[in-house]
Amino acid sequence: MDGFQEAKERAKTLREAIEHHNYRYYVLDAPEISDAEYDELLHELIELEERYPALVSADSPSMRVGAAPAESFAQVTHRTKMLSLSDAFSLQELSAFLARVGKGLDLNQEEIDYVCELKVDGTAISLTYEGGLLTNAATRGDGQVGEDVTLNVKTIRSVPLRLRLDEPPPLLEVRGEAYISLEQFTGINKEREAAGESLFANPRNAAAGSLRQLDPVVTAARELDSIFYGIGYAEGVSFESHFQVLNFLRQAGFKTSPFAKRFKGAAKVEAFCNGWQEKRASLPYEIDGVVVKVDSLKQQARLGNTSRSPRWAVAFKFPAEQRTTNVLDIEVSVGRTGALTPVAILEPVLIAGSTVGRATLHNEDEMRRKDVRIGDSVIVQKAGDVIPEIVASIISKRSGAERIFEMPKECPVCGSRAIRPSGEAVRRCTNITCPAQRIEHLLHFASRSAMDIDGLGPAVAEELLAKEIIEDIADLYFLSKADFEEIEHFKEKAARNLKAAIERSKERPFSRLLYGLGIRHVGSHISDVLTENFRSIDDLATADFEALTAVEEIGPAVAESVISFFTEEHNIKVIEKLKAAGLSLKVEEKGGQVMPLKGQTFVLTGALDGLTREDAGERIKALGGRVSSSVSEKTDYLVVGSEPGSKFEKAKELGVKILNEGEFVKLIGG
């Protein structure tokens, strides 16, 4: 047996094992192996598929890790319209719905069977399976046409890539909800707050935003979950009741609500809804109500639909829980990227099952808009029943002793200047050595796109800073053998490898070091633009606003950020230490080197087979060319891989020269 055939059989075995354990863990909540053992199986499969690309299949578990970023979402027409549900905001409105159903069916309410399911607060999705294989996933959209989010949905581990049925129907369109757990929601918002980004208002908002990421790797990192509740279209299979549909979905490998119940009569339905209104805080995910459906599909057909919602179903919505308390003080927290966030210190109050003593005010504009003052009586709720937020101040209760809070002009952690860039809502600490942001900055500096220091991960970074082995990124280059021995569980080989990686990083070009400094708004591409025009760190440090904005692609926000960075004394000290360590803080002019692509602009689109887009970009820059993210009249070449996006059409419209991968490789010299 040849190597490929052995790899093919092993890949098949691995796929079956991984999907079995996915189902046990994410659907049944009954794992059979440890996380480490699962990771070993997945890692082995990915290695096999990288070695033999022909082994990659549409239902491979490796698809859940994330694919190449999309450039836009294609439209998908649903086979049957995805209707919205009408709402009942009280038990009285629910009772009125049940009465209408009884009247429409000409039956006593207590003779009708209903199914009650918890209404998970996420975003609706529709999945299409052909011959048991997932071929398409779409958002609800306007109910008739949604967006193709197949690559993103494949990252959701509770979604079966292939149905767990011996004889799957030829065509099946299932309906469900993608959602984010409360724990994930809290973690995502903490990261966004630290980065100075706007927070997701609730788990539904977070799930929708995650599902519509153009880069599936971002979606995969958000760890979405799913729950399914219906079938929109099916061939080769039929059902008599909704409860039968739920059982079929479970057998096919879908995650359905474990709390779904079938009841006869209106009284039990109302009791179920009322009971879950009290118990919802016990769940690990957000629910905003209960969906009540007539069980019989024949009865559903008799009742029919309005233009936007079925007459046989309703969403009983829970009221938002709010409490009144007092603002004892307002403090400022500093996030990992230097963002200063005002936080209200509250008189503790019980909301949705937990005691709340702090509430974010997001930023100074939001604080002013709500006019929150120290000493105010305020209405507080949990955004999405998770993150405490102040809804409003109760102005009528003011005594005149309340105090307006002013955001500090200096960082409360390190005392450095805190500035608010024009056009932004967030004030930021300008000191890259600030203790509040050092870990994140160190990890960014060591990342692959910057200095690429292999072995410097979160655990090592935290220990280096916690034990005060280093104070800033420049100290990495002055570490001794004894310093490495201070790192817990760090063996001699690991220390030697990290030391070597740090030494190798000295060879990185100036543009990557500039990116690694973490200047706000200066990503890897802008770093390239800046170093093309300012050939050393000293040139850049002394450039004024006019000189910076005179450079194409450098706008006012980038210019202000660069100037602010170089006026902070702590940052200058770090740069001086980097110079002393022997790093390259200028563009190395290589005499006699042929730069055949000098002055030429390239754009890359689609997936390349022989090299990554990052590697292709590095090759272009090494030969004097520049890489842009968008096609314009100034683009010289568009390099096209498989499945190109909208850039391909625009390049054709503008008459830009288009190269396939073979032509590109030939151009750059193989």
Image (spheres, helix red, strand yellow):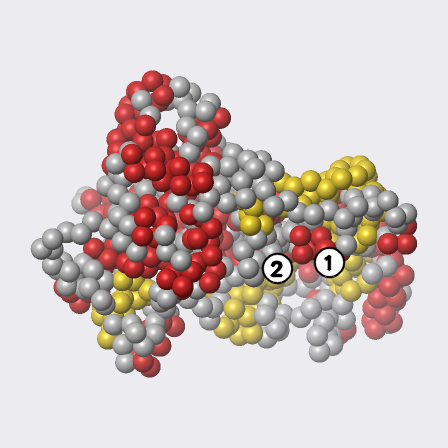
Residue 405 position within the rendered picture, expressed as x and y whole percent measured from the top left: 73, 46
> Label 2 is placed on what type of residue?
Thr
Please tell me the numbered disc located at residue 432.
Answer: none
Residue 350 horizontal side relative to residue 645, left or right? right
Residue 669 horizontal side relative to residue 82, left or right? left
Residue 198 position within the rendered picture, expressed as x and y whole percent measured from the top left: 60, 55
Residue at 59% x, 47% y is 193
Residue 464 position within the rendered picture, expressed as x and y whole percent measured from the top left: 43, 27
> Label 1 is placed on what type of residue?
Arg
Under circle 2, the secondary element is: strand
Q: Nearer the viewer, residue 399 or 211?
A: 399
Q: Nearer the viewer, residue 157 or 608?
A: 608
Under circle 1, the secondary element is: helix
Residue at 32% x, 48% y is 537
Mark sitting earlier along the chain (2/1): 2
- Residue found at the very far left of the displayed protein: 592
Neighbourhood count class around disc 1 (C-alpha, 10 Å): few under 14, some 14–19, many 20 upward: few
From the image, tell me which residue sits under label 2.
Answer: 123
Residue at 50% x, 57% y is 153
Tell me if residue 587 can be seen: yes
Residue 296 horizontal side relative to residue 654, left or right? right
From the image, tell me which residue sits under label 1.
Answer: 369
